[in-house]
Image (cartoon, rainbow, N blue to C red):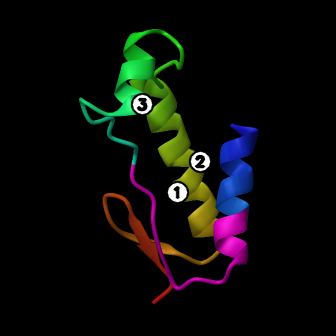
Amino acid sequence: DDDWRATLDAAIGAGPDHVSAYALIVEEGTQLARRIRRGEIPMTDDDAHADRYLIADEAFAAAGFHWYEVSNWATT
């Protein structure tokens, strides 16, 4: 989760007034889907996604962002 926190810090540090943080959806037929299916890349489990969402919400709230939609935060 250190990489995720660093990504959030970089996003906040860029000074936006809005952030969208959606979970990745792996589409069938893509190179990523094929690599996951072959076991070359692990798929993140639902608990890890949920934990990272909570980390994002805490980081954005601490930076003055307000949650207004499932994956969106804004300062205004």
Mark 2 nearby-residue class (10 Å; few <14, some 14–19, many ≥20):
some
- The residue that appears at 70% across and 50% down in the rendered structure is 5
The residue that label 1 is drawn on is 57
Q: Residue 60 appears at what percent x and percent y?
A: 58, 66
**As shown in the figure, which amino acid type bears the numbered disc 3?**
Leu
Task: Work out how far the residue at label 1 is from the one at label 2, CA to CA, in angstroms.
Answer: 6 Å
Q: Mark 1 touching mark 2, by CB under 8 A?
A: yes
Q: Residue 49 appears at what percent x and percent y?
A: 46, 35
Q: Which residues are magenta?
A: 10-22
Q: Mark 3 touching mark 1, by CB under 8 A?
A: no
Question: Is 51 contained in the magenta span?
Answer: no
Q: Which mark is residue 55?
A: 2
Q: Secondary structure at mark 1?
A: helix
| Image quadrant containing the N terminus | top right
* Picture quadrant where residue 13 is located: bottom right
Outermost residue to the bottom = 76
The residue that label 3 is drawn on is 32
